[in-house]
Amino acid sequence: MFSLWQQVVLTCRKRISGYLEQLNLFVALFVTVVMIYPLSVQAHLRDDSLHSLPPINSYIVKEVGSSTLLMAKDVDRPVSPASLTKILTCTIAIESGRLQQEVLITPESTMVEPSKAGFKPGEKIKLLDLVKAAMVNSSNDAAFAIAIFLSGNVDSFVVAMNSKAKMIGMKNSRFTNPAGFDKGIYAGNTSTAGDLLRLTEYAVKNPVFNEIARLDKAVFTEETTHKLYSLKTHNKLLDKYPYAVGIKTGYTTKAGACLIARAIKNNKDLLLVMLNAKTDRWNVAANMFDTAFLANKPDPAWIVQTSRDDSARAGVHVIREQSKTNTLSSVKAGKRKYRLSKVKLRSRRNVLALSKTARKSKHHALAISNSRNKVKRNAHALTTTIRKSKKHELASTKQSRKTKKKVTIS
């Protein structure tokens, strides 16, 4: 009897130890999967870090007076700068030394759309007030009136604009008009984020420009009739971001939403150029400024170099013919992008597979745990049965002894 129960107990112990070994194996596998999964996700996120950046064709953020770029993307990519062109127009006007002179508004300068102050032919406006109207309200009639007043006609002023741009160091820019139009007879008005940053850094050295660039409203009167003009800014960043100090907004259908902004905080003076923003440029600009103010050094994730195929596409409207070298480089870049997309797809599949394995391991571990509990209960039941059997056996032995004594006595 004892040997039978000993065999049963030994068998149960072996089964329990076997289950424990399996449980340990699956727990180790589960822990491994749990550790690998976050690393895989982190690596995947690093691969996609550039795609999480704001949807902007090109941008640049830099501290005034520093040669280090804090943020940059496609800084040499030629695009339409829209009304950011007026910064160059107004800079030329400020440097002319004629700001207090009266400007006769001509019919040609009023035949522009869509953004304008509403000047009438024959009115006389001070050159300084025209600069305010062009910078603050982005008035196209003010920009054309400045050009005609300073150079006699628009074409001559455009020559002066391009000459000034070269002097400043704007090597990748070409201007066709003083306002920033980019269609019809004014097609080809292009610049880059890098060039516009050079222009702005040059312009902010002038105190008159700085004073005008930070205005949220331009108020002035016509010199003869004293008609009052009150023009508001389009720059919503002045209300949204407490450290913003102007400078210029721009928009056309081709150029998209553009912005050159300046912000000063804790003696840190930053300039931002944003071209063709396909999102809320005000919130994005505020976030970029906050990031730049907190950064002690450039963040590599924000420094995006222009790819060869992007540069080629951007220059189509300026250079009509592409060389075979550029074509081949574009094809290679496309293949690289295709290979990268396949790698990312595999990475995502691997992450999903690991996730499924982790779930299965959890279920399996729970099943083993349940089985282990059942084995423990069965073993406990067996132990209880053994104890009862021993008691029964002892009781039987005592009873047999008593019976023997009775038989002997009788």
Image (spheres, grey):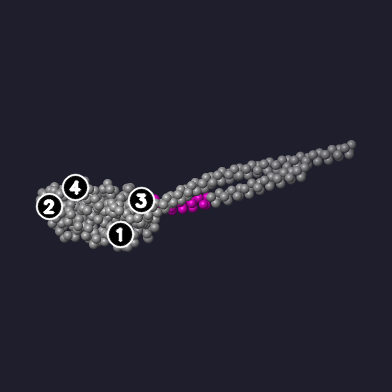
**Label of residue 112 in the image:** 4
Residue position for label 2: 104
Task: Report the amino acid beneath label 3.
Answer: Pro
N-terminal of the pair, mark 3 or mark 1, is 3
Q: Can you identify the residue that label 3 sits on?
A: 54
Could you tell me what secondary structure mostly forms the magenta stretch?
A: helix
Q: Residue placed at 39% from the left, 56% from the top?
A: 301
- Outermost residue, left direction? 224
Relative to 253, 117 lies left or right: left
Quadrant containing the C terminus in the rendered view: top right
Tell whether 84 sits left or right of 354: left
How busy is the neighbourhood of tag 3: few (under 14 within 10 Å), some, or many (20 plus)?
A: some
Q: Could you give the CA–CA distance between mark 4 and mark 1, rounded to whole angstroms? A: 36 Å
Residue mark closest to the camera, 3 vs 1 = 3
Q: Is residue 37 magenta?
A: yes
Where residue 100 sits: x, y (%)?
Answer: 14, 57
For the residues labelled 2 and 3, the Cα–Cα distance comes to: 44 Å
Magenta range is: 34-55
Which residue lies under the disc numbered 1? 269
Spatial CA distance of label 4 from label 3 is 33 Å
Give the CA distance from mark 3 to mark 1: 22 Å
- Asked where in the image residue 304 lies, by quadrant, the reply is bottom left
Circle 4: element type: loop
Is 313 part of what is drawn in magenta? no
Amino acid type, residue under disc 4 in the picture: Val
